[in-house]
Amino acid sequence: MDIQLKRGLLDACVLSAIKDRDSYGYQIIKDISPYVEISESTLYPILRRLEAAKCLTVRSAEHNGRLRKYYRITPAGLERIEAFKQDWKEIEAIYRFIVREEARDE
């Protein structure tokens, strides 16, 4: 898969995982894992990139004696999800065209 496409997909997945409630790294991985494989080494750079893009904010809170970072989606993050949905419609149309061509070849 094209790396830029995959990056966009994973960004949208992470933003969707925190869309309805604040969350932390391990929980985000658990929420996404049934749909796509993601590791900590993949997740944390995504979170930093989304924070730099102002798509999410970060706060630290103590949990069982340790600091845990919680991530919250921003209005820019919600807009990013909506933009992804619109882009996805175009990707689906391209996919249908490609599959149609393959079906004709059979």
Image: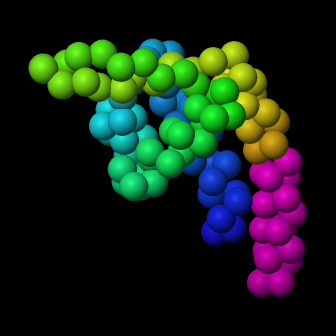
> Which region shows up in magenta?
89-106
Q: Position of residue 36 (x, y in %)?
A: 46, 51
Name the residue: 54% across, 45% down. 46
Say left or right for 37 vs 106.
Answer: left
Residue 54 lies, with reference to residue 29, above or below; the image says: above
Q: Is residue 99 magenta?
A: yes
Q: Quadrant of the N terminus?
A: bottom right
Left or right: where 44 falls relative to 27:
right
The residue under the point 48% across, 23% down is: 58
Q: x, y (%) of residue 33? A: 38, 46
Residue shown at the point (77%, 84%) measured from the top left: 106
Colour setting: rainbow
* Left or right, residue 63 beside residue 10: left
Q: Is residue 46 above or below residue 14?
A: below
Picture coordinates of residue 70, whole percent (x, y): 39, 22
Query: Visible in this render: residue 81?
Result: no
Q: Residue at x 30, y 37 (%)?
A: 26
Residue sitting nearer the eye, 93 or 9: 9
Our reading of the magenta stretch's main secondary structure is helix
